[in-house]
Amino acid sequence: MKKVLLLVLLYFFTLPLFSQNQADKLKLQKNRLLLYNVGIYLHSVNQGSIDIDSAMTLAAKAQKLPYTLVNDEGYNDGAYFPGNDLISNNNIQRAILLLPKLKTVDQIKLNLQLGNFYLFKPGTKDADIKNALWYIIKAQKLSEKLKTPKWIFQTRLLLAKYYYQAQKPQLSATIFTELVNWAKTTKEDHIIAEAIENQGTFMPNDKKEKAVILSQAMHLYKKLGYKEKEIETLMKIIPVHFWTGNMKLAKEELLTSLRLQKKIGFLYTQYTETAISYIELLHNNLKNSLYYGLESVNSMEKTKDYAFADSFYIRLGNVYNQTGYFEDALKFYQKGIAYNQRELNTGTWYKSFFGAVRSIMNRNKYSEALHYLETNSKKYPPKNNLDYMILYQLKACCYDQLGRLKETETSYEKMDYFARKLNTPESVKDIASCYSLAALFYTKINKPEKARAITDRILAITNKHTEGFTRHLLELSLFKIDSLNGNYLSAIKHFETYTKIQDSMDNVIKNGEFENLKFKFETANKEQNIKSLKQKTKQQENKLNTSRLLNIISVSSLFLLLIIIVLLFNRAKIKQRNTRRLELKEKEINLKNIKLERLVEEKEWLLKEIHHRVKNNLQTVISLLNSQSAYLKDDLAISTIKNSQNRIYSMSLIHQKLYRENALSTVNMPNYCLELIDYLKESFSIEEQIHFELKIDPVELDISQAIALGLIMNEVVTNSIKYAFTDKTNCIIDISLIETSENNYELIIADNGSGIANISKLKNSNSFGMTLIQGLSNTLEGHLSIENKNGITLKLNFTKVLA
C-alpha cells in the first residue's frame, strides 16, 4: 500500500514537470517552424539578393529568437545546457571560457553550438569558417572518445554542413551520403529522416533532386506524426519547384502547407498566404490573388507581426496595379514604404518604391513618375544589381513615353549592363520582363536585329514552362520583329498567343467577383478604421483618466514630499545640535587628555630625577666608604667595606640605567649583567686572570627583581673571584640567565675552581653573604640550589613578575 501511495505521489509531482518539458519542446518546434517560414520567404522575396543565412538571421532578429535555433535541432531539444544562453546573447568569449569546466556531453553540445554560431553567421568570413571547423573538430574528438553514436552522428552532420558552407559541395555530399547510409542501418525513422532532411537541405534550389530527397524525409516525418517537421520540410521543397518553373505544383504544396499550419494552430500563416497570392497573380487569377493577399494582411494583424508588413502590402499593390486600380495600388505601395522605414530593412523597400512608380506611370503621369524615381533613387541608391536593372528599365519606360528616345536607349543599355551581372535562378523572371520591354522598344525605333538579339536572350534563359514574367510583351515583340522581317506566318502565331494572354487578363479585370472582393475589403477596411477610431477615442479617454489620476498622485506625492522634507529638516536640526554637543565634549576630552599627557610626562621626569638622585646618593655612599677604608688597617674591615661598595654599586647601576633609558620600571638584563661584570673585573683587577662567559637571554625584569638578581650575582661572583681559584690559570666563571619556559627563568653561576668539600655546611652557614643570597632568593620566590661539581655551581629558578 505504501508503494502504491509513493508511486501516486511521484506521478502527481512529476506530471507538472513532464508537462512543462513537453510544452517547452512544442514551443521550440513552433519557433523553429516560424524561423524557417519567415527565412525561406525572405530569401525568396529578395530573389537571391541576400543569402539564406542572412535571411534566417533577419528572421531571428524580427522574431527575437537566437539564429542558432535554425541549425541546432539535433542537440538542442529545448532542455538547458550550459553556455547556450551565453551564445544566444552573443557573449561568445564567456561561453569559450566555460568550456573546460563542463562535463564531456555538455562540452560536445557547446562546441557544436559554437561551430554552428560561426558557420552560419551572415556574410561568413574566412576567419568564421576556420573558427567553425575548430569547434566542430573539438566536438568530434570528444564524441569519438565518448563512443556515443548520437554525438558522432551530430558532429559528422555539422562537419558536412561545414564543407557545404566552405564551397566544397562534393565532400559535403559524400559525408551526407555516408550519414544517410549509417542512419538506415539503425532502422530508426527519426534518425533516417533527420539525415535525409539535412542531405536535401544543403543542396542548391535549382536541383530537382533536392525536392525528391526532401520528400522522402517529409513522408517519414508524416509517418512519425512530427507535424512541425512535416511542414518545415515541405516549405523547403516549395522553393525548388517554384524556382525550377513548376508553379502549379508549388501552389498546390503551398495550399497543403497552409492547411497543415492551420490544423496545428500555427498562427503565422501570412508568409504562406502571400506566396500563394503571388503565384495566383502570375497566373492572372486576380480574384484568388486578392483573396490570399487580404488573408495575409489579416494574419499579420492577428499576430501583430509587422516586421515584414511592406511585402504584404506590395502584394496587394501589385494586384490593384494589374487590375487598373492605380490610385488604390499607390496607397498600398506607400503604406509598404512607411512600414519598411519603421520596421526592419528587409531589402524589399525598392519593390514598394518601384510599385509606386508603376502606379504613377499607369495613370499616364510619366514626368511625375520620372521625377519621383530620380529623386528617391538619389536619396536611397540601390544596393544590388537586380534593383539597378529594374531602376533603369523604369527610367527607360518614362523616357520612351515622354518621347526622349535617345535617353530611353541609353537607359536600356544600362539596364542590360546590370542584367548580365545576374545569374541566379531567382532573378530570371525579372530579367525576362525587363528584356521584353527593351525588345518592344527596339521594334518601335525600327531596330529588329537588336530586338531579335534580346528576344533570343529571353528564350535562352527561359522555357515554355517559365512563369512570372510579361510573356505577352515577349509575344508582341516577336510579332513585330517577324512583321518587320516579313515573316508573316510566324508573326500571326505570335500575335494570336499575345491576344490570348491579353484577353485572359482583360476578362479577369472585368470579373465582377473581383469587384465584390474589393468592395468587401474596402468595407472591412472602413469598419477597421471606425473600430480603430473608437479604440483611439477610448485610449484618449483612458489617457485623460490616467492623466487625472497622475495629477492626484503628483499632488499627493508633493504633499508627502513636503512632509518628508519637514521631517528631514527637523531631524537635521536635532542632528546638528547633537553634533555641537559632541564637539564640545570632544574638546573637553582632548583638553583632559593633554593635561594627562603632561602629568605623565612630569611623572616620568620626576621618576628619572628620583633614580638619578638615588644613584648619586649611592655613589656618595660608595665614596664615603672608600674614604673610610683609607683610615682602616684591619684587612677584614677593608674587605667588608669593599663588599659593601660592590653591593651598593650593583644597586646604583640599576638606577643609573633607569634614568638614562626610556623604560622607568624595567631593566634590560643583558646590558646590566655585562656592565656589572665589567665593574667587578675592574674592581678586583682581574681582567686577564679570570675569563667570564655570559649567556643572557634578552629579558626585561621588574626593578625589584633586577636589584635582587644583581645583588645575588655580585655576591656569588665576588666569592668566586676571592676564594675559588688557588691557581690563577684557566680560570672560568660561567654566568647564564635563560628562559626555561614561558615567564620562567633560571640563573646559573658556575666556576671551575677548587670547590668546597662540605656543601651542606655552606648552605647552613650564618655568614652575611649566604644569608643575603638566601634572603634575596626568597624575595624572588625562587628555588635556590648549590652544587659542588668541578667547582661551585649556583642555580636559581624564579618566575618573572608581569607588569
Image (spheres, helix red, strand yellow):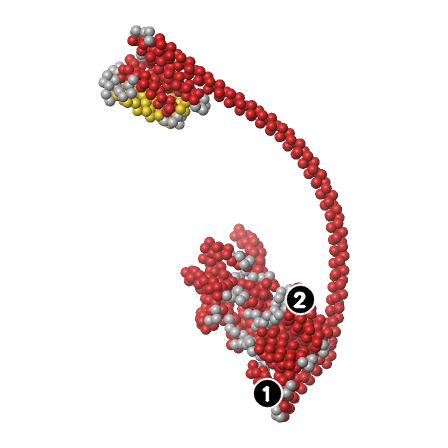
Which of the two discs, 2 and 1, labels the residue nearer the N terminus? Answer: 2
Pick the residue in front: 313 or 479: 479
Residue 316 occupies which quadrant of the picture?
A: bottom right
- What label sits on residue 339 in the rendered view? 2
User: For residue 534, which quarter of the picture?
Assistant: bottom right
Quarter-wise, where is residue 327 in the image?
A: bottom right
Q: Nearer the viewer, residue 385 or 686?
A: 686
Residue sitting at 67 percent across and 73 percent down?
373
Secondary structure, mark 2, is: helix
Q: Tell me which residue sits at (50%, 63%) in the image.
A: 118
Residue type indicated by callout 1? Glu
Which residue is labeled 1 in the image?
449
Residue 88: x percent and y percent?
Answer: 55, 59
Residue 366: where, in percent of width, then height? 70, 77
- Provide residue 148's location: percent of width, then percent of height: 44, 62
Residues at circles 2 and 1 in contact by the CB criterion of under 8 Å: no
Tell me the quarter of the image containing the C terminus. Answer: top left
Select label 2 or label 1 by which is in front.
1
Residue at horizontal 66%, vertical 82%? Answer: 405
* Residue 700 visible (yes or no): yes
Helix, strand or loop at label 1? It is helix
Q: Amino acid at mark 2?
A: Tyr
Q: Residues within 10 Å of mark 1 (few under 14, many from 20)?
A: some
- At horizontal 36% and vertical 13% (from top left) the residue drawn is 645
User: In this rendering, is residue 91 above or below 668?
Assistant: below
Q: Is residue 315 left or right of residue 530?
A: left
Horizontal placement of 654 versus 188: left or right?
Answer: left
Q: CA distance from mark 2 to mark 1?
A: 45 Å
